[in-house]
Image: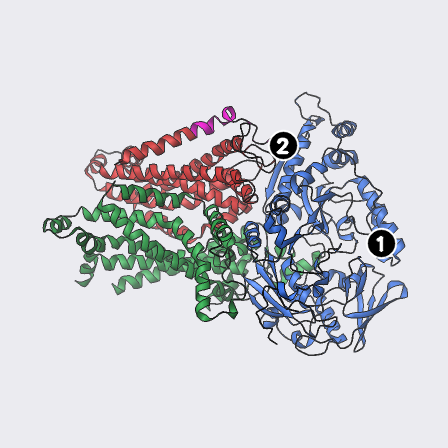
């Protein structure tokens, strides 16, 4: 098992190298440079000033030199500084926005699990029944709706017309003057809409998977035995079936690890949330090379870790593989 | 109690009607979708303008119909691309195995690590936001799943008797792939493709939000929705109809796809 | 005394080091935290800010600034002429990525005569130079010898201005508090909160719940959505022309557009009122020249050519464009009159304007296609390489009417701003003259002549000057719109005690 993990871990390195190389090439081949963006067609900025900027950022060096420089820093975990604005270190800018993106994604995931798992279980218990059909349509609705459409409608409804929830942002004005408890409540109120919208639109995936996994499990022999033994239905469902049906879900969870630090730029723009999605998009639009490389690399690492976790979880959960490696 | 067939029929029926309307858009629409008519801007639905008008006075109903052409084109085009790339690569990887398989799967892994956002911007920057570039992007970021599916099917089919028989009989690889493997691998691929069209339409609307989708004056459902964002409190019809159109269409594709999945499982 | 002004902004600031700030959000904040030597009064004359007065000597070659005494930086250190010297040194420093160096490179030398006197000597008389000293002055004692990248000062600015920096939560808000020692007088409003709300639709929803006090609205929102009793009770709308214009630019190197008559024809074929009605809902005005209509440089005698498609056709026919084969499109020597109208993505009014223009040009037989390109690609692939036929763009103008960078024939290298390669010897001469003349009456005459010549030549078809449409919460008093905008007298705004919304905060030193 450990050997397997080790081998997998090592094989990741050339992959990572390949990804960073390709990313670097792609973004440098894309038309537009950060200095053009910085100076933004401002007549006050002369040609010389722009050329000067290019030199300052080392953008006039040949590509392989630039890549070499980046790689050298990368090995020491230094992603360099953002070329935009106040030139904070890339890691710092990402770290600043990571908590809120992570929070929303984790909360959303929890909400999804909380709803999708029971839905999947119950629906599988009575396939094609009313509950099954109704919830299926419901989750498909969530999947089929453009997020920003739903978000704006809900913001209007709950924020402006009913005035139950704040419209956007993370804190109300003057929140520092509130007590600790009140601050948490306030954050909660601000996160309610974003998390719900995020969860609702992503319900379909896990709930359908849960359902189909559950359906398969319910057809197994040992379930029939349990029923034949006269066990109560919910006992059968929850104690026996669900446990086994959950295994593939764990695989999915592993694969959604990279998604946890991914933000949706549209979502964050509408809700005025200072998250990683907006940062990634703005960096891409501004051709902020160090920032983009930072994102792509971290994204790649997270995906690879996620895959690894999923494989491990699957191997661990599947008794056949476990038994094999113990021999 | 409604069966899977029922849903497939319902969804499929809706899509057929939609396709017919889209193709017949020039005949069915009541106005020229590009006709700017400023005095008639932002009128609510009426007998003249069934779905109202937008901020430049253009008829929403007609734009919706022509937008259906675009959105369906994008969906089918993008999925067509993913099917093409994915099937070819999946067949190659599954059949030949060895280093071909390793290389292809490595490429798949690498592609999966890329957030589509950056690829999207890179391609749009190089080619310009247009019908072609959107189809390209969605296509180039979605083939990985198909490859994996096809490869898995090929791997399991390879060991089956009829394939062994074909080999023994001396059939060459391409023939085997074309006549035997492909038809059998098609089922899960079809499901994935159907769902993929729905996803492609949603991606198009997201791209329009970011201003990177099909550009006006060409109407697409995505950019109709974007136009509507600016008139949110004033013209409910501008938001409702494109939004519903996207919703119902994607829903239909999803329902059909899932229904096909249920059906194929049973057989 | 008291209360807070909550301002909504679509973009976040990028840096708070003033000479590096080129985007509007950073400029908004720097404008409250820092001062320049001079500033603009509501009537567009220059008055002293950090400089009490100044003397222009030697026919404009020398400006001597006499600085205010008793001005302190927000950390208590006195402001002196050495801060001015420091700022100037950094502006011309090749290692500093400031976009503003252009104007300051005309300076031959800057000498500190004493703690409160600075002498600036120019290489040759440079009229826009005085206005360029509206540039924000930076604190030498905090920024000299310090690596700006690692120093916290980039995100915690210390200035001399009416508001002191308090906090910046990236992507969320920037908070400023009143400077009790401000040299004019302490601002009445205790706090200034700059909220970042990236989406215009969300911004309007926030206005609808009174969570934003000041924000711009779109023409549609202005016309249709603020007539409700809610908005009429709680907000006051303002409307004044913005300082910039939108135009159609022709590439004069392209043989299709080399003939002046063609450009004039294209001008006559556009119905500008229609665009202003349709796109801006009437909230803008027609422009005929490269200056804002309220500027002293604007030549009001030039009346815009009326919408006249017949005249357009006649002019085009004179230039050789006729529909000889009856297919509905104009042609000349066998080629159809067709081109692409290019504009940038992300600007909805421009795209709408482009569509309206396309329709009118097609009506007179020109096959126009619209292409919308992402901004950075636009600049890199089309603008800097002059690889375009017709563009639809806008300029945001500085207050001084010097148009050297945009219309002088020497500024046509790639990366420079005479995008269409316009060349007119008389205009060139006048532009250079205008820069060297300090006499206001003479300058006025010069620029008005430039305006007339440019309109005749039509290197641009000037479309419109849009109105700025800010909405301000009704509780604020002393809000007086002027040609230079709304916030010039921010320190005089106040809210009567009983109407204050955020007065439960205590101002911390």
Same chain, labels 2 and 1: no
Residue A297 visible in the picture: no
Q: Residue furthest top?
A: C326
Classify residue C475 by image quadrant. Answer: bottom right
Residue C215: image location, x then y, percent: 62, 55
Specify whether residue B115 is painted magenta.
no
- Report the span colored magenta: B19-35
Q: Quadrant of the C terminus of chain B?
A: top left
Q: Colour of chain C?
A: blue
Q: Colour of chain A?
A: green
Left or right: B262 in relation to C291:
left
- How far apart marks 2 and 1 lie (CA) works out to 44 Å
Left or right: C226 in relation to A267:
right
Give the residue pinned by disc 2.
B37
In the drawing, what numbered circle is on residue C434? 1
Q: Nearer the viewer, residue B168 or A74?
A: A74
Q: Nearer the viewer, residue C360 or A287?
A: C360
């Amino acid at each position: 098992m450990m050997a397997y993990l080790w081998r997998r871990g090592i094989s990741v390195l050339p992959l990572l190298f390949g990804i960073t190389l390709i990313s670097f090439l792609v973004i440098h081949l894309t038309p537009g440079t950060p200095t053009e963006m910085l100076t933004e067609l401002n007549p006050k900025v002369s040609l010389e000033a722009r050329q000067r900027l290019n030199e300052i950022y080392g953008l006039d060096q040949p590509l392989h030199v630039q890549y070499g420089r980046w790689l050298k820093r990368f090995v020491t975990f230094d992603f360099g500084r953002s070329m935009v604005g106040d030139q904070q270190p890339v890691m710092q800018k990402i770290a600043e926005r990571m908590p809120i993106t992570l929070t929303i994604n984790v909360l959303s995931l929890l909400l999804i699990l909380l709803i999708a798992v029971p839905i999947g279980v119950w629906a599988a218990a009575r396939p094609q029944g009313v509950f099954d059909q109704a919830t299926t349509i419901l989750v498909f609705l969530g999947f089929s709706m453009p997020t920003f459409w739903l978000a704006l409608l809900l913001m209007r409804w709950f924020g402006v017309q009913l005035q139950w929830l704040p419209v956007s942002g993370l804190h109300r004005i003057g929140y520092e003057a509130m007590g600790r408890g009140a601050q948490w409540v306030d954050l909660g109120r601000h996160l309610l809409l974003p998390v719900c919208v995020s969860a609702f639109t992503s319900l379909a995936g896990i709930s359908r998977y849960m359902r189909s996994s559950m359906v398969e499990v319910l057809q197994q022999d040992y379930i029939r035995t349990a029923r034949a033994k006269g066990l109560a239905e919910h006992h059968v469902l929850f104690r026996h079936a669900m446990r086994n049906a959950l295994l593939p879900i764990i695989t999915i969870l592993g694969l959604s690890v990279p998604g946890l630090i991914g933000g949706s730029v549209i979502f964050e723009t509408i809700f005025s949330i200072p998250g990683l999605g907006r940062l990634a998009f703005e960096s891409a639009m501004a051709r902020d090379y160090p920032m983009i490389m930072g994102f792509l690399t971290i994204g790649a690492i997270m995906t690879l870790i996620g895959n690894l976790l999923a494989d491990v979880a699957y191997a661990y959960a599947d008794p056949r593989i476990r038994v094999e490696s113990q021999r | 109690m409604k069966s899977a067939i029922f849903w497939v029929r319902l969804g499929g029926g809706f899509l057929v009607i939609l396709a017919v309307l889209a193709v017949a858009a020039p005949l069915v629409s009541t106005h020229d979708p590009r006709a700017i008519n400023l005095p008639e801007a932002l009128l609510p639905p009426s007998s003249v303008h069934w779905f109202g008008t937008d901020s430049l006075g253009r008829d929403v109903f007609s734009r919706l119909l022509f937008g259906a052409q675009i959105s369906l084109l994008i969906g089918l085009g993008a999925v067509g691309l993913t099917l093409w790339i994915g099937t070819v690569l999946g067949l190659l990887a599954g059949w030949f195995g060895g280093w071909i398989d390793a290389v292809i799967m490595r490429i798949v892994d690498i592609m999966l690590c890329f957030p589509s956002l950056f690829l999207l911007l890179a391609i749009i920057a190089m080619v310009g936001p247009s019908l072609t570039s959107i189809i390209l992007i969605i296509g180039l970021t979605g083939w990985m799943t198909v490859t994996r599916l096809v490869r898995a099917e090929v791997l399991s089919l390879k060991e089956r008797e009829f394939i062994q028989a074909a080999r023994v009989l001396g059939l060459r690889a391409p023939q085997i792939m074309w006549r035997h493997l492909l038809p059998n691998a098609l089922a899960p691929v079809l499901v994935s493709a159907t769902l993929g069209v729905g996803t492609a339409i949603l991606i198009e609307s997201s791209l329009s939000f970011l201003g990177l989708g099909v550009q006006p004056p060409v109407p697409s459902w995505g950019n109709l929705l974007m136009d509507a964002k600016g008139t949110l409190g004033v013209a409910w019809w501008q938001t409702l109809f494109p939004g519903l159109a996207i919703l119902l269409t994607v829903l239909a594709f999803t329902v059909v796809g899932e229904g096909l999945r249920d059906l194929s499982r049973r057989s | 005394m008291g209360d807070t002004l909550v301002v909504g902004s679509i973009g976040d600031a990028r840096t708070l080091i003033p000479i590096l700030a080129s985007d509007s959000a950073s400029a908004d904040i720097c404008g409250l935290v820092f001062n320049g030597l001079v500033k603009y009064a509501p009537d567009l004359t220059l008055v002293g800010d950090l400089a009490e007065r100044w003397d222009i000597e030697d026919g404009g070659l020398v400006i001597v600034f006499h600085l205010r005494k008793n001005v302190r930086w927000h950390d208590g250190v006195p402001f002196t002429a050495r801060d001015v010297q420091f700022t100037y040194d950094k502006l011309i420093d090749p290692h500093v990525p400031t976009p503003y160096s252009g104007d300051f490179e005309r300076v031959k030398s800057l000498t500190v005569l004493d703690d409160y006197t600075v002498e600036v000597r120019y290489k040759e008389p440079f009229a826009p130079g005085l206005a360029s000293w509206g540039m924000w002055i930076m604190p030498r004692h905090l920024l000299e010898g310090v690596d700006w990248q690692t120093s916290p000062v980039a995100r915690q600015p210390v200035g001399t201005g009416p508001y002191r920096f308090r906090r910046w939560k990236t992507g969320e808000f920037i908070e400023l508090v009143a400077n009790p020692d401000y040299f004019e007088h302490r601002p009445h409003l205790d706090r200034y909160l700059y909220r970042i709300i990236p989406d215009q639709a969300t911004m309007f929803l926030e206005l609808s719940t009174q969570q934003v006090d000041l924000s711009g609205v779109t023409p549609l929102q202005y016309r249709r959505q603020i007539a409700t009793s809610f908005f009429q009770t709680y907000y006051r709308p303002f409307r004044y022309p913005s300082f910039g214009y939108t135009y159609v630019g022709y590439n004069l190197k392209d043989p299709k557009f080399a003939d002046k008559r063609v450009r004039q024809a294209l001008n006559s074929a556009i119905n500008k009122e229609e665009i202003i009605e349709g796109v801006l809902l009437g909230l803008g005005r027609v422009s005929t020249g490269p200056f804002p209509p309220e500027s002293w440089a604007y030549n009001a005698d030039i009346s815009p050519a009326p919408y006249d498609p017949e005249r357009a056709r006649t002019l085009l026919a004179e230039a050789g464009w006729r529909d000889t084969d009856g297919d509905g499109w104009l042609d000349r020597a066998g080629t159809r009159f067709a081109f692409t109208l290019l504009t940038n993505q992300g600007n909805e009014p421009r795209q709408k304007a482009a569509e309206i223009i396309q329709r009118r040009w097609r009506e007179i037989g020109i096959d126009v296609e619209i292409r919308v390109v992402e901004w950075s690609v636009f600049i890199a692939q089309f603008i800097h390489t002059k690889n375009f036929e017709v563009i639809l763009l806008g300029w945001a103008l500085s207050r001084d009417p010097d148009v050297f960078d945009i219309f002088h024939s020497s500024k046509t290298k790639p990366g420079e701003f005479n995008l269409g390669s316009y060349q007119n010897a008389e205009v060139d001469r006048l532009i250079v003259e205008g820069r060297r003349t300090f006499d206001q009456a003479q300058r006025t005459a010069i620029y008005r002549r430039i305006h007339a010549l440019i309109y005749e030549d039509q290197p641009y078809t000037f479309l419109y000057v849009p109105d700025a449409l800010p909405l301000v919460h009704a509780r604020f008093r002393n809000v007086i719109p002027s040609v230079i905008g709304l916030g010039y007298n921010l320190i005089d705004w106040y809210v009567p005690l009983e109407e204050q919304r955020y007065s439960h905060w205590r101002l911390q030193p």
